[in-house]
Image: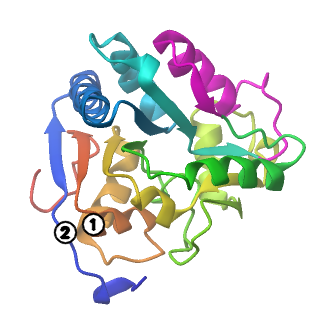
C-alpha cells in the first residue's frame, strides 16, 4: 500500500450536526440502511462494530431503529484488550453484549476472547472474517488518530485480518479519560485489533466521531497527509466512507463540513 502523498485521496462524505445526539441518530439511520440493503441483496449482512464512549448514542439509536433484520446479521468484533476478563467494566466483549448484541437480538457474533490466548483468538476470528468482506464497518477515530487500536505509526501493510499491537501512551490516557480505568498503569499494554487493510475491505464504512477532544484527529484525518502517523487518514483511500461529526469535532476544519 502506498503511503503519504503517493496515495490517491478519495472524497469522504462528511456530515456535521449541531449536537452529538442528532449526529448519532443520523449515523444510525445510515448504518441501518446499509444493513437492510445488504440483507435485501444477498440474504445476510456482515458488520464490524466499534466500541468506546463515542459510540454510546449511536448504538442506542441503531438498536432502537425499526425494520433492521438483525436475525440476518453476523457481527465481528473490532478490537479488544489482551488479558482483560469479560466482567471488567472496560471489556469490549462486555460492551458489545450489553449495548449491541443483546438489545438488537443478534445471534451470530464473533467476539475476541483475548484474556488467555490472544493469538489464538485473533487467528480463529480472523479466519472467519477472511471468508467474506464485511458489508459495513462502524468505526470511531481516537484522540491520537487511531483507527480501531491501530495507534500511530499504524501498520498499513499487513494483510492479517487481526494483529496484536502495543498501545501508545496517548491511547492509554484516552481510556482513562473516558472513565474505563483509574490510571494509565491499569490500562493493558497490548490489544488485538482489526488491521487497517482489513477495515478497508468493508464495502461501506460509517465513522462516528463526536466531541471536541477528537477535533485535532479529525483535522489530521481530513486535511493532513495520508500517513501511518495519522492512521484514520487512510479512510480517504476508501470509496464509500461516511464521516459523522458534531460541531465540536468539526471545529478545527479549515472548510466547515
- Residue at x 39%, y 84% (from the top left corner): 3
Q: Position of residue 105 (x, y in %)?
A: 51, 12
- Displayed quadrant of residue 80: top right
Rendered residue at 76%/44% (across/down): 187
Q: Residue at x 57, y 71 (%)?
A: 159
Q: Residues within 10 Å of mark 2 (few under 14, many from 20)?
A: some
Q: Nearer the viewer, residue 149 or 241?
A: 241
Mark number displayed over residue 10: 2
The disc at residue 183 is none
Q: Is residue 42 visible?
A: yes
Query: Which stretch appears magenta?
Result: 82-110
For residue 152, above or below residue 2:
above
Q: Position of residue 70 (x, y in %)?
A: 42, 19
Residue 234: percent from left, percent from top: 37, 68
**Residue in the picture at 48% in, 56% down:** 147
| Circles 2, 1 touching at the beta carbon (< 8 Å) | yes
Magenta stretch encompasses residue 108: yes
Q: Secondary structure at mark 1?
A: helix
Quick one: label 1, few (<14), some, or many (20+) residues within 10 Å? some
From the image, which quarter does the N terminus lie in?
bottom left
Q: Is residue 52 visible?
A: no
Give the numbered dot on residue 236.
Answer: 1
Instruction: Using the image, determine if residue 213 lies above or below residue 151.
Output: above
Q: How is the image coloured?
A: rainbow
Query: In the image, is residue 191 part of the stretch drawn in magenta?
Result: no
Tell which of 231 and 197 is nearer to you.
197
State the image coordinates of residue 241 (x, y, percent, origin top left). 25, 52
Side of 161 relative to 17 (left or right): right
> Is residue 121 or residue 257 the one in the foreground?
121
Distance CA(mark 2)–CA(mark 1)? 5 Å
Specify which label sits upstream in the sequence, 2 or 1. 2
Foreground pick, 141 / 156 = 156
Amino acid at each position: 500500500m502506498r503511503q503519504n502523498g503517493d496515495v490517491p485521496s478519495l472524497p469522504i462524505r462528511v456530515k456535521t450536526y449541531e449536537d452529538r445526539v442528532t449526529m448519532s441518530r443520523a449515523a444510525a439511520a445510515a448504518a441501518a440502511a446499509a444493513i437492510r440493503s445488504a440483507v435485501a441483496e444477498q440474504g445476510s449482512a456482515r458488520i464490524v462494530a466499534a466500541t468506546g464512549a463515542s459510540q454510546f448514542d449511536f448504538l442506542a439509536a441503531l438498536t432502537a431503529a425499526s425494520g433492521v433484520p438483525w436475525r440476518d446479521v453476523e457481527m465481528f468484533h473490532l478490537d479488544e484488550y489482551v488479558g482483560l476478563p469479560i466482567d471488567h467494566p472496560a471489556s469490549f466483549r462486555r460492551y458489545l453484549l450489553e449495548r449491541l448484541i443483546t438489545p438488537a437480538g443478534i445471534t451470530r457474533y464473533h467476539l475476541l476472547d483475548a484474556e488467555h490466548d490472544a493469538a489464538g483468538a485473533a487467528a480463529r476470528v480472523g479466519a472467519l472474517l477472511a471468508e467474506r468482506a464485511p458489508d459495513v464497518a462502524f468505526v470511531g477515530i481516537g484522540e491520537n488518530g487511531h483507527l480501531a487500536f491501530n495507534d500511530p505509526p499504524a501498520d498499513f501493510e499487513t494483510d492479517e485480518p487481526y494483529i496484536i499491537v502495543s498501545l501508545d501512551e496517548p491511547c492509554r490516557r484516552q481510556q482513562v479519560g473516558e472513565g474505563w480505568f483509574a490510571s494509565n498503569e491499569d490500562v493493558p499494554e497490548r490489544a488485538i485489533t482489526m488491521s487497517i487493510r482489513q477495515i478497508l475491505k468493508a464495502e461501506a464504512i460509517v465513522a462516528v466521531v463526536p466531541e471536541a477532544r477528537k477535533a485535532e484527529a479529525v483535522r489530521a484525518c481530513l486535511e493532513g497527509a495520508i500517513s501511518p502517523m495519522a492512521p484514520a487518514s487512510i479512510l480517504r483511500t476508501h470509496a464509500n466512507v461516511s464521516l459523522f461529526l458534531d460541531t465540536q469535532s468539526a471545529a478545527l476544519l479549515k472548510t466547515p463540513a
